Image: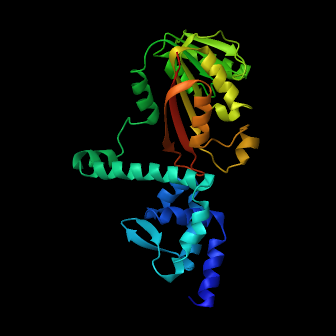
């Protein structure tokens, strides 16, 4: 390898993000959107780093339809890449990225399987009247068991209102009295009279033990000073064998949410959320990356369900 090539290669390797990308690309050829999902980063950042890696001769791309796929370049320029990456393969960052890669590859396999069902594939690509996420959510909720629900940290109240249409009773808990008042107005317009309105902190619930069949924390944990305490309180109020549903943000780097949206935590990694839920007495945990926001900064949503131990 010439001195100029060596210098260019070492400069390209002197960045954490680029090393993380190389660790993924040595395992699998990936598109920009797939790297974006696996690394939980914005498209512009991914594209900028790929350009530098390509200029250094470390990666190459190929066109497939409307997408470019990237892979490691074979040859002398990457002969020593293993020696650079090996000391960090067990790091938290690399392990988190590998979990993201698993999700990407699972999604790719599912897409590939669907391709062979030509009718369904063509149908799914069309814009269909009446097909909205809210409509689908309402339909699926019809299958939810009736019972006593608690919605902790109600936000805009949309989920609370949907739950009220299938539950025997819903207890809506929020720190903001005005949020609860707005929910009450919206519930009145829908003639929903099975909602209890409770002003309180999700980390110190003014509710009795073992009262609820299902407890929901939708985009609420990132507002909690102590997420573990909020989950412990959720566990306390659930009946033995009851269910927990958590909807949260995957860990991200958008620090502006703390000032503008009063977020205390910038989301959670899969491992962090798993440990929090299991440590507070829940079992049969199912956790997955559910959907990515199509608008920048493309937040990823995690969905977790678990059962209270008897």
Q: Residue at x 65, y 83 (%)?
A: 7
Residue 298 appears left or right of 142: right
- Looking at this rendering, what residue extends furthest in the bottom direction? 2
The vertical placement of 238 against 76, above or below, is above
80 or 143, which lies in front?
Answer: 80
The vertical placement of 149 against 78, above or below, is above
Q: Position of residue 178 (x, y in %)?
A: 72, 21
172 or 178, which lies in front?
Answer: 172
Q: Residue at x 50, y 61 (%)?
A: 24
The vertical placement of 288 against 230, above or below, is below
Residue 203 appears left or right of 24: right
The vertical placement of 147 against 260, above or below, is above
- Looking at this rendering, what residue extends furthest in the right direction? 259
Q: Residue at x 65, y 64 (%)?
A: 16
Q: Picture quarter containing residue 160? A: top right
| Residue 182 seen by the camera | no
- Counting labels gives 0
276 or 106, which lies in front?
Answer: 276
Q: Position of residue 245 (x, y in %)?
A: 53, 27
Which image quarter is the N terminus in?
bottom right
Residue 58 appears left or right of 153: left
| Residue 179 seen by the camera | yes
Residue 16 appears left or right of 289: right
Q: Picture quarter containing residue 152? A: top right
Q: Position of residue 208 (x, y in %)?
A: 65, 9
94 or 186, which lies in front?
Answer: 94
């Amino acid at each position: 390898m010439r001195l100029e090539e060596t210098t260019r290669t070492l400069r390209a390797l002197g960045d954490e993000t680029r090393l993380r990308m190389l660790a993924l690309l040595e395992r699998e050829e990936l598109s920009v959107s797939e790297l974006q999902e696996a690394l939980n980063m914005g498209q512009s950042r991914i594209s900028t780093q790929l350009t530098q890696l390509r200029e250094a001769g470390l990666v190459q791309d190929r066109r497939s339809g409307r997408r470019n796929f990237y892979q490691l370049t074979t040859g002398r320029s990457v002969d020593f890449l293993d020696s650079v990456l090996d000391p960090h393969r067990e790091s938290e960052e690399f392990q988190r990225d590998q979990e993201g890669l698993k999700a990407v590859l699972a999604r790719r396999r599912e897409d590939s399987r669907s391709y062979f069902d030509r009718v369904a594939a063509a149908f799914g690509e069309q814009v269909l009247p009446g097909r909205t996420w809210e409509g689908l959510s309402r339909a699926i909720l019809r299958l939810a068991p009736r019972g006593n629900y608690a919605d902790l940290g109600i936000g805009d109240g949309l989920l609370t209102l949907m739950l009220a249409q299938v539950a025997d009773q819903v207890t809506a808990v929020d720190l903001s009295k005005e949020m609860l008042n707005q929910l009450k107005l919206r519930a009145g317009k829908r003639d929903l009279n099975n909602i209890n309105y409770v002003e309180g902190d999700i980390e110190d619930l003014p509710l009795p033990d073992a009262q609820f069949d299902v407890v929901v924390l939708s985009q609420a944990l990132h507002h909690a000073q102590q997420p573990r305490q909020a989950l412990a309180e959720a566990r306390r109020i659930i009946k033995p064998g009851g269910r927990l549903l958590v909807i949260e943000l995957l860990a991200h780097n958008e620090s502006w949410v703390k000032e503008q949206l009063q977020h205390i935590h910038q989301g959670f990694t899969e491992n962090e959320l798993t440990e929090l839920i299991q440590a507070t007495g829940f079992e049969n945990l199912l956790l997955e990356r559910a959907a990515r926001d199509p608008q920048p900064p493309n937040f990823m949503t995690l969905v977790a369900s678990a059962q209270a131990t008897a």
